[in-house]
Amino acid sequence: MPTTSAEAGGETTGPTSSTKPTVALPARPRDLKLDAVDPCKLLTDPQLDQLKIKRVHPWTYDQETYRGAKGCVSDVSEESRRYEYSALLVTTEGVEAWLTGKRNVESEAVEVDDYGAARYRLTGDGPNSAPCTTALDVAQGQQLQVTTSTTGKDFSQDEVCRMSEKAANLVLTTLKTLA
């Protein structure tokens, strides 16, 4: 079934909750429910400094798939490069949906601090600086997506994905203290 994707979370055209992943994720060390989490509180001040974040602001996902999901965008502005991290709290679908091979993404299973995750980017975006998302398997039917988006071609695709995983690791560290 064809799919499309938008910004951080992606847009799909078809059922996803019953699809089976093509790879197995490790068991979660513990559930980290997202229902009462403020996405803009997932990075501490030292973590914001580490990622060189200058400004954070909340947003709400408005595409069909995750309509109403809470998110936070964190802007980075270096002398010659601009990019952002975004976190999206998805409480309606687990991370497995990204690993079924039925979405318009190139994805792979990864592990972030003992939690399974799907790292993905849109199919066909080419090898340079496409947004990259690390979707953390935090609870049954829930995922925490951390996306790195860049402007221009100042970053390689591998670098953008490493940045996403690094930010996901920091967010997960904070989430563990909140749950």
Image (spheres, grey):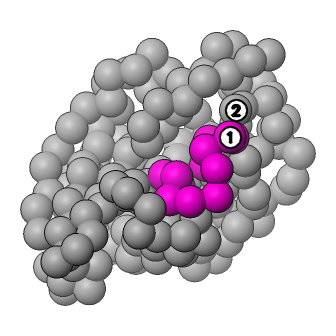
The disc, 2 or 1, on the residue closer to the chain's N-terminal end is: 2
Residue 60, quarter of picture: top left
Mark 2 vs mark 1, foreground winner is 1
**From the viewer's perspective, is residue 132 above or below residue 122?**
below
**Which residues lie in the magenta part?**
121-132
Identify which amino acid the numbered label 1 is placed on: Gly
What percent of the width, then of the height, locates residue 100? 81, 38
Q: Which residue is mark 1?
A: 124
Q: Is residue 130 magenta?
A: yes
Disc 2 from disc 1: Cα separation: 9 Å
> Going by the image, does 28 lie left or right of 40?
right
> Going by the image, does 35 lie left or right of 90?
left
For the N terminus, the image quarter is top right
Residue 18, quarter of picture: top right
Residue at the image point whose x is 25% and y is 64% from the top: 82
Q: Secondary structure at mark 2?
A: loop
Q: Is residue 172 visible?
A: no
Identify which amino acid the numbered label 2 is placed on: Asn
Residue at the image point whose x is 64% and y is 58% from the top: 127
Q: Residues within 10 Å of mark 2 (few under 14, many from 20)?
A: many
Q: Which residue is mark 2?
A: 104
> Going by the image, does 71 lie left or right of 9?
left
